[in-house]
């Protein structure tokens, strides 16, 4: 059995991340928690490591894995021609369960599979995942299960399916969600949802097609009353209220 590190404590997480960093840098495969389900991943820039991830899942090159990143700034290093509306989605939902398919930088020396010049990118909202990504950089990560089986929501689920194909398991307890990330294709003029997930269509529409701001009401004009010719031009000091007519109180 490959080692399992308890990442629910500060010391355990530090030990587990250190072990995972070593494995990833050596071209190995790890299981890590995310804000959706557990993922199996490796160095995105190691073709051999990515091939090991696909082999562990029983998946072919026709289904390339997404890439998890440690920060929003990483996007422009991996993708090009990012639409402004895609950046709006990033600002609203990252870190979080939204994967964006973007045009990949042609200069990148990697092999994620048959991507047709694209890359699927996500920044997860999980402290353990972000700590690992912060150390090793972008990782090719897909759900930690055999193809056709339900995604793993615990390390036990993942280990039962993947076994020794994974060098290190990072255990952060059961995931808080059983939903996968929503995938949106951002390579054309208009977004296309490729997979429904934790971010709903209504949430996407609220960012992509915001309702127009309500018109500001016209300022209330002070009501000018006609002068009373019978009134004395000087207010009587004994009058209890000598305020200007029409004044808002």
Image: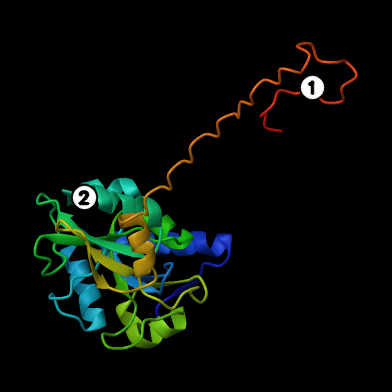
Total labels drawn: 2
* Mark 1 Cα shell of 10 Å, populated few (<14), some (14-19), many (≥20): few
* Residue 249 vertical placement versus 125 (above, below): above
Residue at the image position 40 percent from the left and 81 percent from the top: 152
**Location of mark 2 (residue):** 83
Residue at the image position 37 percent from the left and 50 percent from the top: 212
Q: Secondary structure at mark 2?
A: loop
User: Where is residue 34 drawn, in percent x and y?
Assistant: 41, 67
Q: Between 201 and 32, which is closer to the camera in this rendering?
A: 201
User: Where is residue 185 drawn, in percent x and y?
Assistant: 21, 63
* Mark 2 Cα shell of 10 Å, populated few (<14), some (14-19), many (≥20): some
User: Where is residue 138 drawn, in percent x and y?
Assistant: 28, 56
Q: Which mark is residue 242?
A: 1
Residue at the image position 41 percent from the left and 63 percent from the top: 19
User: Where is residue 57 drawn, in percent x and y?
Assistant: 26, 81
* Residue 161 vertical placement versus 88 (above, below): below
Q: CA distance from mark 1 to mark 2?
A: 62 Å
Quadrant placement of the C terminus: top right
The answer to whether any part of residue 28 appears in the image is no
Q: Is residue 174 left or right of residue 100?
A: right
Q: Between 107 and 197, which is closer to the camera in this rendering?
A: 197
* Residue 186 vertical placement versus 247 (above, below): below
């Amino acid at each position: 059995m490959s080692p399992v590190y308890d990442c629910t404590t500060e010391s355990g997480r530090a030990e587990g991340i250190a072990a995972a960093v070593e494995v990833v840098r050596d071209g190995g495969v790890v299981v890590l928690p995310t804000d959706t389900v557990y993922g199996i991943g490796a160095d995105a820039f190691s073709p051999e490591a990515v091939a090991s991830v696909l082999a562990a899942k029983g998946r072919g090159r026709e289904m390339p894995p997404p890439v998890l990143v440690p920060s929003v700034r990483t996007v422009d290093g991996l993708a090009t021609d990012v639409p402004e509306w895609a950046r709006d989605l990033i600002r609203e939902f990252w870190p979080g369960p939204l994967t964006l398919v973007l045009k990949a930088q042609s200069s990148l020396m990697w092999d994620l599979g048959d991507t047709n010049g694209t890359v699927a990118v996500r920044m997860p909202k999980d402290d353990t995942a972000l700590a690992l990504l912060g150390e090793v950089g972008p990782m090719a990560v897909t759900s930690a299960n055999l193809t056709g089986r339900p995604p793993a929501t615990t390390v036990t689920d993942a280990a039962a399916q993947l076994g020794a194909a994974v060098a290190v398991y990072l255990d952060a307890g059961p995931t808080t969600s059983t939903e996968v990330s929503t995938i949106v294709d951002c390579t054309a003029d208009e977004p296309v949802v490729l997979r429904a997930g934790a971010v709903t269509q209504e949430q996407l529409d609220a960012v992509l097609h915001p309702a127009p701001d309500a018109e500001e009401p016209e300022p209330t004009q002070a009501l000018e009353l006609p002068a009373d010719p019978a009134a004395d031009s000087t207010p009587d000091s004994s009058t209890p209220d000598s305020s200007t007519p029409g004044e808002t109180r």
